Image (cartoon, helix red, strand yellow):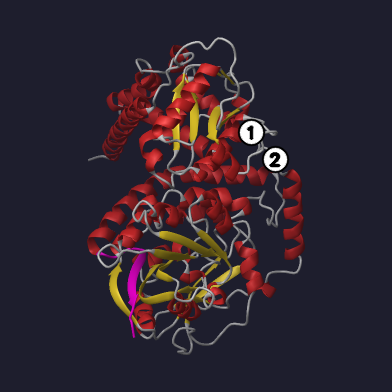
Amino acid sequence: MTRAHRSGRRTRWVAAAAVTALGAGTVRARRRLAALPVLAPAGPYGAPRPPLPGWHLITAPGVAADEATVRAAAGHAAREGLEVVDLVPARLDAESTLGLLRLLDPVAHRTDRCAPGQGAGHALLVSDDVHRRAGLDTAVPPCSTADLLRLVRTLKEYAPDATGWAIAPGLTVPPPDPARHAEELRARGLPPGLLSAARLAGLALLVKCLVSAPRWGAAATALYWLQPAVVLGPARGPRTVGLARDTASRPLRALSGALRTLATPAADTPDAAGDATRRAAYTAELAAGTDRFFEPRRPDCPWCSAPEPAVRLRTPDLLQGKPGRFTLEECRHCGHIFQNPRLTQDGLDFYYRDFYEGLGGDGAALVLGRMSDTYRARAEMLRPFTTPRAWLDVGTAAAHFCNAARTVWPDTRFDGLDMGEGVHEAARRGWIDTAYQGQFPDLADRLAGRYDTVSMHHYLEHTRDPFAELDAAVKVLAPGGHLLIELPDPRSRAGRLLGRYWLPWFQPQHQHLMPSGNLEQALAARGFTILAVQHGAAHQSNGDFLGAVALAANGLAPDPDAPWSTVPATPARRAARSAVQAMAVPCYAAALALDALRTVVARATDGGNAYRLLARKELG
């Protein structure tokens, strides 16, 4: 077979895959659209009535809702047990509707407590209780659609299983503003540059398929071109504005929109003064260098005290791109891997800043909010052994695990402990019952014997002294209580294959990575009985190849606009970052496929990139 024949064959397979993906996406969009209820106002109301008691209507500028629509929405909320209703205009343009349906599954997101809030960005009906707990100010209305998109994400967190969506025929909205498209994508927690690069790559792929595999290419192109009409044409509820025009011009509109987004500079953030203050603070800290953030290198293993550990890898900060280099060493005797030299407390504060909160808060929340299945699997691990009544989640961050675990154990009291301020926000949302902020060993005496279950999910590897954390768990657990721990598995084959680009190394945050045998021995020495150990079941689905591509792309072209960046944020550096992100798009697609295969293998062989361990504190 000649090279041309092999290339044509590959293109046909790619085109067939494109047809399959587009067909599946079209069917999915139709299903989601059909799941959106349509409000049916009872009729005209005559004279205006007083404001609807118990509810607040929040609209973007230029949006108007008649009284019949508002009262119909309140009636729908009462019938369905909702506290937040996102009102979707019936006369929305085609691309905005399709974009919403790509992100929103009305059925799944209604019951998924961790799913990020998505909406049309035009109008929200909010109950008094949620409005009060979220601290909203009725005197300060949203300034833009982007503000409302950010708001629905926040409100979904305060009403995790009481947020719904409905098509509102009585809602009138202004036409979309293409100049604000990138800002609105960012408000949804999505990267405009990467999405635009992916769209351009998809259009280029369709052209290639048309040339090299005309039959399959024509089928894929036709399906893409006609998708708006197929999804929205005979639909119940929406009366899409300009459907025929948008369908006919879709490829050109997609091309021009992607190019416009790539050419649009990042919008100024609402907190420009805060950004300037943050940059000045980082500049002042970095003026003294990063050497002061490290302790002296230790000559032995912190787990077993064996001498002369070997260097496993050296790496810069590929997560945020902050200055500094970090070394992981491995004990030749017990296999424990640890950061050496390790960061001081000031160093940890510096490298954690703006990761889970602040600048990185939205990104962290987006990632943590997509792990509902993992959270439920962790909670289900206890089912054969006990019924938890009082559960303390240590290192809870914003308490996404506790929020999801309530669906498994609805009668359990969940409390959370963390160093960050987010633990108090989790309590205000109702995701945990009690929030504790501080170091676990420092609070252990205060909490002694209060809990029958303690969990540490991807927490122990972040701590400076894992033994002190285990000792604290012994104090806090009542006799017969259970300790659930999940950790990266440092013996994962992917760690050796991917080197510094293996995401679970997670430098500079991870201080210790211990093999499961080491942890089992440490727990046994503290009076625990190991009940179950899971490897394949604990595998993190996109933690290997997808994470490696993200780290490599970020390492090649760090964000020059980051406040800790030590290089000028010139147009050339911004263009280089956009180019790297665009070239990474096909790599992301390949990584997703590899991770899917890797997950199947991990589940089948009981060997993945993480492990989960359940132990019981004995009565003696």
Magenta region: 606-620
- Left or right of 308, for residue 225: left
Q: Quadrant of the C terminus?
A: bottom left
Question: If you read the primary sequence from the N terminus, does the residue marked by circle 1 or circle 2 appear first?
Answer: 1
Amino acid at dot 1: Thr
Amino acid at dot 2: Pro
Would residue 384 be counted in the magenta stretch? Answer: no
x then y, percent, for residue 460: 47, 71
Q: Secondary structure at mark 1?
A: loop
Measuring 39% from the left and 86% from the top, which residue is drawn there?
Answer: 333
Does residue 424 lie above or below 67 as drawn?
A: below
Measuring 70% from the left and 40% from the top, which residue is drawn there?
Answer: 270
Residue 212, labelled with which disc?
none
For label 2, the residue is 270
From the viewer's side, name the closer residue of 573 and 307.
307
For label 1, the residue is 264
